[in-house]
Every structure is written in C-alpha cells, then in structure tokens.
Image (cartoon, coloured by chain):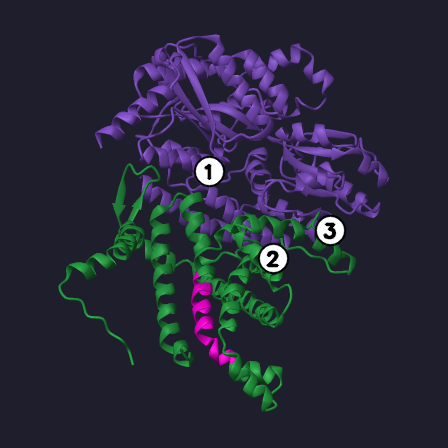
Amino acid sequence: MKKYLLGAIAGSTILSPIAAMAQTEVQFWHAFTGRLGELVAAQVEEFNASQSDYVVVQSHKGNYSETLNAGIAAFRAEEQPHILMVFEVGTATMMAAEGAVRPVYEVMGESGATFDSDAYIGAVKGYYTTTDGNMLSLPFNSSTPVLWVNRDAFEAAGVDPDMDLSTWENVGEALEALKAGGEECPLVTAWQSWIHLENFSAYHDVPFASKDNGFAGLDTELMLNGPAQIAHLTAMQDWAQDGKFIYTGRRNEGGANFRAGECALFTESSAGYAGISSEAEFDFDVRPLPYWAAVTDEPQNTIIGGASLWVMAGHSDEEYKGVGEFLAFLSSSDVQASWHQNTGYLPITAEAGDATRDAGFYDENPGTDIAVIQMTANEPTANSKGLRLGSFDQIRGIIDEELEAIWSGDKTPQEAMDSAKERGDALLRRFEQANG
Amino acid sequence: MEKRVTFRGWWLPLLLIAPQVIISAVFFFYPAAQAIWQSLFIPDPFGLSSQFVGLGNFEFLISDKFYRTSFLTTAIFSLLVTVCSMIPALFLAVIADRLIKGSGVYRTMLIWPYAVAPAVAGVLWLFMFNTRVGVVSWYLGQLGYDWNHVLNGSEAMGLVVVASAWGRISYNFLFFFAALQSVPRSVIEAAAIDGAHFWRRFFGIVLPLITPTAFFLLVVNVVYAFFETFGVIHTITAGGPQQSTTILVYKVFSDGFVGQDLGSSSAQSVILLLVVGLLTVIQFKYVEKRVHY
C-alpha cells in the first residue's frame, strides 16, 4: 500500500513540469472544436506567453450540453474547473446555482484586474447581467440571427437579388416569385426556436415569457402563444405547405443545403459567416432579419445566442486573481477584434467593434457589421434583453416538437403553441420548485 | 434425474457465489437503490440542495400525457426491434447451416456489424437515409417516394428500428447458428426419409428443438430494445419528429443528462426497472411454458 502511494506521488511529480510549480494553474473548459477550437487555443497560448504568474490550461469537453454536464458532474465530485463555458440556454441554471459559481463582477473586483462593465455592449451584456446591473458571467461568443441570401439562386429564378427583403411581407412575395421561377428550396432555417420564436419576440418587442422573459423571477410563464407569434407561424406554416419553406431539422442542418447552393434564403446565426464564406460557390448577401410591418413600424433589437464564461466556486484567492487576469485579457480590444473578424461572432465591447470598423474590415467584407447594427440599433427593452428560463434546453426541445407538428400540418399554430406553453410551464414550475 | 452436489458447511459455497453476489451488489443493487432513493427528491443540478417530494416525481410523470404515450411508443419500438433482429437472424442462420463450403467466411462477415457501437450505427444509417445526401433516400426519390424522416414520424420510427436491429442480427445469428448445429442430424435425416420436405422438417423438428435459444434471445433482445438503444435514437432523431421516437429510456437520458432533472430521471428509471421486471416475469411465466428444454 505504502509502496503504491509513494509511486503515485513520484509519478505525479514527474508528470508536472517544474515551471508549473511557480505558476498558478487555471483550468478552462470549453465546447469548441475545429477552427474555433484552434482559435481558443491560440488565445490561451497568447495569454500564457504574455505573463509568467499564471498558466491557463484549456480543455475541450464536448458540445455545449456535454460541457455543461461535465462541469456539473465535476462540481459534484469537487473537481470543478475555474472557468466553465456555458451556452446561453444554461444561463438560468447557472444563475440559480449560487453556491457553485462566483459572479464575474465580484471576481474581477477582488482580483484587481481592469474591468469596466460599461465597456461591454448592452445587448450582449444584458443577457448575463442581473436586474440590478451586476455582470454574472463574461460573454464569450455571441451571435444573432440574420438573413442569408443566395444571389445566384435569385437570378436563376428570375428574381431581382437586390429587392427589399427587410420585411416578412416582402420575403413572402420573394418566396412566391422564387417558387414560380422554379426554385425548389426558397427558404430554409437553422435553430427554429431561437430564430422564429425567441428572436422573433424580442425583435417585435413582444414578450416570450412573463416576468420580463424570466429576468424578474422564477415564477415566469411562457407567452409564446401571443397573436404576433401565431401570425408569423401561420405564415410559415402556409409556406411550408406550399413547399416554399423547407424544414431540415432542429439544429443547423439547413446550413448544408444553403452552403451547397440549393436554397435561396436562409435564416441563420451571424456566426454562420465562417462556414458560408469558405464553402459557398455563389454570390451571397447578408441582410438584417426581416420583421412584419403589420406588427411593428420599426424592429427592436435581436437577442444573442452563444456562450459565456462562468467562474466556478471553491478555489483559492490566488487562483481567482489568475482568472481575473485571463478574463481581462479576453475582453481586451485586440483579442476581441480579431475574434470577431475571424469567427463572425459579435465583438463584446464597443471598443472592439470600433477598432474593427477603423481597420476597414466591414468595408472589405460587406454585411459583417449587420449583426452588430441589428443588436445595437435600439436600447433593449424588457422584451428584448434576453431570456432567462430554467430547464430551457428541454423547453426548446418541446418547442421543436410543437413546431414540427405545425410544419407537418398536424396542428394549427395556435394549438401547437398553446400546448408548448402548457408543457413548458410545467417544467418551469419544476425548476422553480428545485431552485426556489 | 437431477444430480445434486451437497456441500458440508457454509464457507465454501459462500465463497463460490461471492464474486457473483459482489458484482450484482456493486453494479446492480447499489445503483438501483440509489435510483429509488433519488426518485423521492427534486435536487438542483449541482447537488447543492434537494427537497423531499415523496412520490411527487411519479405523480408529475403520470400526469404527463406525453410520458404515457411514450409507453406505447416503447412497446411498438421494442416489438419491432425484436422481430426485425430475430427473424432475419434465424433465416440467415438456417442458410448458413446448410452451407458446406465457405461457411466460415460467411459467418465471420455476418458477425461484423455487432462490433459497431449503437451510436456509430445510428450515424451510418442516418447518412444513408439523410434527406439531402443519403444514398437510399436519393434512390427512393428516383422511384418517386419522398423520404423525409425529419417530419414523418412513421419513417423516423422505421429508421431507428432498422438501425437498432441491424447490429443485433449478428448477435442473434451467432446463437441461432450454434443452436442449429446442435440439432441432432439423425432426427432430421429420419424425418427426411419419411418424406418430410425442408420446411416441414424446420417447423416440425428444428424450431421446437431450438426454442430454448429463441426464448433466451427474446428476453435479451427485449431488454436490449428497452435499455441500450438511446444512442441510436440520440444520433438519428433525438426523439422526434414531435415525440414519435421518444422511448422510455431515451427520456431517462435526455431528462437526466440534457435537462439536468435528476429527480424525474431517477423516477423514470425506477418505472423502467419495474416494467422490464414485469415483462421478464411474464415471459418466464407464460412464454417459457412453450419452451422444450
């Protein structure tokens, strides 16, 4: 027994590099692979090279849901990382876990790192900020839905690709013309609930859920069965029945169709830019997400999707200083500007956005600033600050199911959304009970 | 006549059954007891607090009509998976049994699919039936059939059944093949001399003689369909469209590991445990009566 113990100690000493003894280690778990994973690794390396007190160790823990689960399981086993990436859907879960996380504003305040919460873009920051203005997690990768246009497909169908597509009314006419011109896939979407319900509601300044979309309390109820949402889904259902809107799946399956040039219009995140610009062999445009002129004269702002970085509880003060330094580094203007330009994600500070504009990036890559403009055009209202709903991953699953019933014609939009509300509310009550 | 060996004293017999008892206790009784205990609480995901709710989790489930529908979905799914994995396996085994040359190669190739993990099998089938790039869906399109399992519940069910059953055919084939080999040739030859043709011999002699194997496979295949298929469903349909492929075990997985609702997930696994226990009892009580050992 003793022998084994000694062996284990000897082994662990050999394995840890000598340099790490003097440096404080900060664990960072994230959900990025491929190109995004490389960019995260590069950020971490740059930070590690820039100073000698701390060393950040990044590791990939699977997709968003898996990363959150890994973090939760690790916390239960008291092996949690210092920094955990959590997608926006998990925000309410993390906020409710008061003993498991440390608010970012507090960590930054104590660490003495430079931190000014006013520097962050309101519409991005708002999602992760309490009603009294305290920032709980650091926005990392944020995107917002926009309309992608395949100009070649428009021309092939004999439709002017420069036509005004700012309203759904106009898009409806375009779909009609595209269909008549022989286009087999006029419209396709990714992330249907996020774009056509969550963002739709914020953009038209109608509530998605009561209590300021859940910001003001756990006793929130879904309100996605309101007249504005039903009107939109009714139009979408008609388009689906006429073969003008093609449903491809719950996630971003439609991206493959669009990038291959098979579809004319695509509602997808602004972060689709990296994939579309590298794969598309056709001329494309980015346009703002359309709105219904019948519902509003001028659209509000859209909301974000993506992930933020949460600081987990249970580590030493020295380590939290390192966390603070790293988060300050990530928020710095240069790091943010290059992240924004490489990925299509939004810059999280206004300064990074300005730096990108000054460098002429938007002029060289037209349309890349649409998402920023769309997010920041108006001061967010209670309906457009974001969503904060417990069990939201599951609720999105329910919404997906009900939307599928609409597209297949099994239910009317009103029936489907009433059912989504009833089922979603049951989960919200359970979440309230577990965290109240 | 049964042979009975009698041990003197307790130590040796206890020692002999100890490994089995320990394995059952550690890997079965302990987790099962944990699941039952946790099903009485609503915990928060991080385990910071939990509230005792008694049978509240069960009430929540029973009052959910989608959960009740999930029982029917599971019944249909399990029946189809069992039938689709056993009948082709038996057919292939009968053919292999009649082979004189090359049966080794044939057998080896039939066993391969069993080595493919369920989730991987799911992805393979999904590629073939992908509504956009799938080979099979393209041919179906050429024949004028518009395959769309993304919106059509029956097609989605068909796809997950085939993907789940495919790998199991190998497993069942192995057992059927071994069983067929053990059927005494003399009995079959005698029947052949009496003028019984192949199918008459098969149904009259071979099938009754291999019922113990068939019964064993029935039990393990039902258990497989109930417990081990969530990987396939997760990769192909994630329970959709609507709820047409949400079987009980998939709901346990998604509520527990996607929704972080451990209370409900535990309650569901307890219910699942009861259902499978009940099913096994029924199988042993009624179906086994028709088995000739």
The answer to if B217 sits in the magenta stretch is yes
Q: Is residue B265 visible?
A: yes
Mark 2 or mark 1, which is nearer to you? 2
What residue is disc 1 on?
A66
Q: CA distance from mark 3 to mark 2?
A: 44 Å
Q: Foreground: B108 or A159?
A: B108
- Percent of width and height locating residue A341: 63, 19
Q: Amino acid at mark 1?
A: Glu
* Quadrant (top left/top right/bottom left/bottom right) for the C terminus of chain B: bottom left
Q: Amino acid at mark 2?
A: Met
Q: Residues within 10 Å of mark 1 (few under 14, many from 20)?
A: some
Q: CA distance from mark 1 to mark 3?
A: 35 Å
Tell me which residue sits at (66%, 21%) in the image. A369
- Provide the letter of the chain coloured purple: A
What residue is disc 3 on?
A243
Left/right placement of residue B66 relative to residue A342 reads left
To the question of a shared chain for discs 1 and 3, the answer is yes
Using the image, name the chain to which the residue with label 3 belongs. A
Q: Amino acid at mark 3?
A: Gly
Q: What segment carries the magenta color?
A: B206-223
Sequence order check, earlier mark of 1 and 3? 1
Q: Secondary structure at mark 3?
A: loop
Using the image, name the chain to which the residue with label 2 belongs. B
**Callouts 3 and 2 close, C-beta under 8 Å:** no
Q: Residues within 10 Å of mark 3 (few under 14, many from 20)?
A: some
Circle on res. B109: 2
Circle on res. A58: none
